[in-house]
Image (cartoon, rainbow, N blue to C red):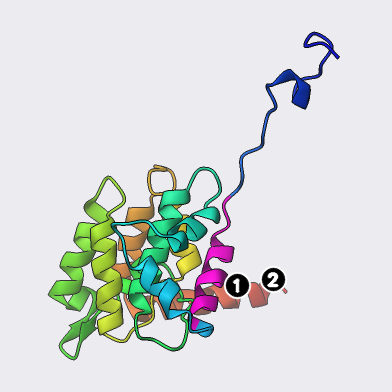
């Protein structure tokens, strides 16, 4: 078969088109939680070595597909920081704004805690993904013995960080400042509406 006779994408034409590998945030979370469950502390320690990429970082990057390898490696780093010395994996829950609302102590949490407020302000003010401030947020959640954000949701939010329509930083800020009583009232209203339509 000559080059003229070959179809686009035919291996013989030398121009084979390969499809981009998609990312899988849930698979990353499942792999990371399995490391904790199976007590693979060496692999988790490798993930905490941010300066020199290890095989563990490369493995985490696989879940990012072709477009998000580095981002997935960095989320794996944050996961490993949170789980250092913890025997039970945490999938986390909620988004980062709701998780940051749990930061604090007896004098106040979330918006009532000046340290938590400053930390979130730094996170949402960043144009680039604020990795250093995210690390501080995860470290504070760990030290307060509070659950982290959902690792899967955090990964998806960071993928869309630069998407102006997604407004991730704004959404995190709204969640951080929404009073707990208001969240409960909103949930009850939503459930009442669902009941009315059933």
- Give the answer, above or below, for where 179 lies relative to 120: below
Mark 2 — residue?
197
Mark pair 2, 1: CA separation: 6 Å
Q: Which mark is residue 136?
A: none
Front residue of this view, candidates 171 and 37 = 37
Q: Residue at x 58, y 57 (%)?
A: 24
Position of 87 compared to 138: left or right? right
Residue 71, position in %: x, y?
41, 53
Element at badge 1?
helix
In this view, the residue farthest toward the bottom is 106
- Give the answer, above or below, for where 170 lies relative to 187: above
Q: Residue at x 49, y 54 (%)?
A: 61
Quadrant location of the C terminus in the rendered image: bottom right
Residue 194, position in %: x, y?
64, 73
Residue 63, position in %: x, y?
55, 56
Whether residue 160 appears in this view of the structure is no
Element at badge 2?
helix
Q: Is residue 45 magenta?
A: no
Q: Which mark is residue 193?
A: 1
Q: Residue at x 48, y 64 (%)?
A: 153
Residue 107, position in %: x, y?
15, 88
Front residue of this view, candidates 91 and 98 = 91
Image: magenta residue range: 23-36
Front residue of this view, candidates 118 and 81 = 81
Position of 23 compared to 77: left or right? right
Circle 2 packing at 10 Å, graded few (<14), some (14-19), many (20+), is few
Position of 156 compared to 131: left or right? right
Whether residue 70 appears in this view of the structure is yes
Q: Residue at x 24, y 59 (%)?
A: 132
Quadrant location of the N terminus in the rendered image: top right
Q: Are marks 2 and 1 in contact (CB under 8 Å)?
A: yes
């Amino acid at each position: 078969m000559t080059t003229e006779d070959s179809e686009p994408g035919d291996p013989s034409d030398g121009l084979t088109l390969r499809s981009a590998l998609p990312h899988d945030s849930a698979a990353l979370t499942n792999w990371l939680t399995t490391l904790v469950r199976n007590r693979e502390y060496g692999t988790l320690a490798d993930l905490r070595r941010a300066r020199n990429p290890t095989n563990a970082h490369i493995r985490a990057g696989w879940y990012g597909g072709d477009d998000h390898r580095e981002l997935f490696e960095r989320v794996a780093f944050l996961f490993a920081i949170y789980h250092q010395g913890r025997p039970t994996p945490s999938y986390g829950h909620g988004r980062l704004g709701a998780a940051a609302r749990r930061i604090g102590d007896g004098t106040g949490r979330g918006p009532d805690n000046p340290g938590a407020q400053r930390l979130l302000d730094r996170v949402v003010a960043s144009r680039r993904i604020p990795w250093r401030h995210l690390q501080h947020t995860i470290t504070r959640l760990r030290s307060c013995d509070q659950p982290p954000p959902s690792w899967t949701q955090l990964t998806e939010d960071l993928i869309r960080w630069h998407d102006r329509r997604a407004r991730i930083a704004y959404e995190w800020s709204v969640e951080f400042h929404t009073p707990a009583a208001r969240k409960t009232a909103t949930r009850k209203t939503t459930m009442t509406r669902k009941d009315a339509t059933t």
